[in-house]
Amino acid sequence: MRDTLVLNASFEPLSTVTLNRAVVLVLQDKAVVEQAHPELRMRGAAVDIPAPRVIRLCQYVRVPFRRRAPWSRRGVLIRDRHRCAYCGRRATTVDHVVPRSQGGQDTWLNTVASCAQDNHRKANRTPEQAAMPLLRQPFEPTPADAMLLALGQDDIDALPEWLAQPAA
């Protein structure tokens, strides 16, 4: 399923939505297509529009300032690009570096993507106790980075240069 980046009327990233939701927003004249997929089109009986990759809302939406990206299992898998932090294979689960039974929390810095085998093998231990070093350390993405990571690497590469760059 392709995700579409939603920009506010002021061109700041707001969120990602499904391709179907993006098309609905465009058809309801609530958004305009800023960038489309080059070879994809959405066709219906009376409609033929390019499949949107980036849309911009027609009216400005005021959103509260977010200092931190909200933690989620899906977010951890996306942040780690669905790669196991212990072996590098495809990850399907989220593992707590410090297990919850030992006081570990659901935070960006305490969770990593993991394959089911390594998650089961590590069990209720820390990586040091299980002799399973992490290939890369977990990090906390900024809200804007989390949104761009949700698009996937292929979609990020296709975004306009000014949008794909992290804010300085």
Image (cartoon, rainbow, N blue to C red):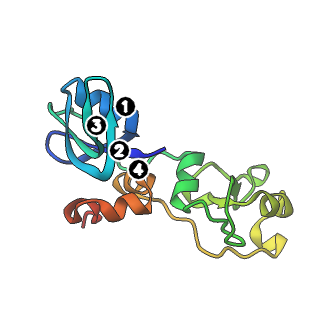
Q: Position of residue 119 (x, y in %)?
A: 78, 59
| Residue at image coords 44%, 52% | 150
Q: Position of residue 29 (x, y in %)?
A: 18, 26
Q: Which mark is residue 21?
A: 1
Give me the C-alpha separation between circle 3 and circle 1: 23 Å
Q: Which mark is residue 68?
A: 4
Check if mark 2's residue and mark 1's residue have beta carbons within 8 Å. yes
The amino acid type of the residue labelled 1 equals Arg
Q: Which one is in front in this view, the residue at disc 4 or the one at disc 2? A: 2
Q: Measured along the vertical axis of the image, is residue 139 above or below residue 22? A: below
Q: Which mark is residue 64?
A: 3
Check if mark 3's residue and mark 1's residue have beta carbons within 8 Å. no
Q: If you read the primary sequence from the N terminus, does the residue marked by circle 3 or circle 1 appear first? A: 1
Viewer-closest of 36 and 112: 36
Give me the C-alpha separation between circle 4 and circle 2: 22 Å
Q: If you read the primary sequence from the N terminus, does the residue marked by circle 2 or circle 1 appear first? A: 2
> In terms of secondary structure, where does tag 4 sit?
loop
Give me the C-alpha separation between circle 4 and circle 1: 25 Å
The amino acid type of the residue labelled 3 equals Pro
The amino acid type of the residue labelled 2 equals Thr
Q: Which mark is residue 4?
A: 2
Q: Within 10 angstroms of label 2, few (less than 14), some, or many (20 or more) residues?
A: many
Q: If you read the primary sequence from the N terminus, does the residue marked by circle 4 or circle 1 appear first? A: 1
